[in-house]
Image (spheres, grey):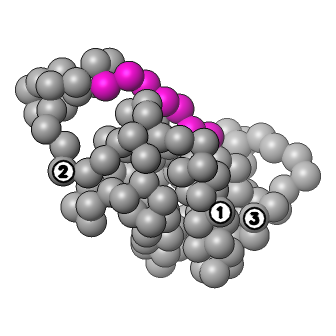
Amino acid sequence: MTQVKIYALRSTLNERERSLISEAVHQSLKDAFKLPDNKHFQRFFPLEPEDFIYSGRSENYLILEIIMFAGRSTEAKKFLYKELYFNLDLMGRSPKDVEIILLESPKENWGIRGKPGDELQLDYPVDI
């Protein structure tokens, strides 16, 4: 399971940009973590300049916060970073303007479809 929070300036998140970012992030997760196509959970947080304070980045600054089941290897995580930077760069977001934060949580800390996460039958691997 993964949930993605995407933070950026409102002025840089028009409908086209949201669609491109969404696809770049989802494709990266499918490639790196072997997520099925139908496991697509993202939330956009468009921020006003006074609510998004940073330095040393352009107006295209983007923060990706990915919350996920614990279990992926360091290699899988590094491959995800590589894929995210590559796919976002293709759509015009420089790697210098992208920060990625992975937050891992044990399956039993999730409640999904009326069950604790550790009781779910998943159709994709977590321990990769």
Residue 95 numbered tag? 3
The secondary structure that most of the magenta stretch takes on is: strand
Residue 102 belongs to the span the image colors magenta: yes
Mark 2 crowd level (few <14, some 14–19, many ≥20, 10 Å Cα): few
Q: State the image coordinates of residue 72 (x, y, percent, origin top left).
A: 47, 40
> What amino acid is found at the position of numbered circle 1 in the picture?
Lys
Asked where in the image residue 8 lies, by quadrant, the reply is bottom right
Q: State the SS at label 3.
A: helix
Residue 82 numbered tag? 1
Mark 3 crowd level (few <14, some 14–19, many ≥20, 10 Å Cα): some
Query: Range of the magenta residues?
Result: 101-107
Residue 82 belongs to the span the image colors magenta: no
Whether residue 84 is visible here, answered yes or no, is: yes
Residue 22 higher or lower than 110, as above or below? below
Between the residue at mark 1 and the residue at mark 3, the CA separation in whole angstroms equals: 10 Å
Instruction: Please name the residue shown 48% across and 59% down the image.
Output: 32
Residue 123 numbered tag? 2
Q: State the SS at label 2.
A: loop
Residue 44 higher or lower than 51, as above or below? below
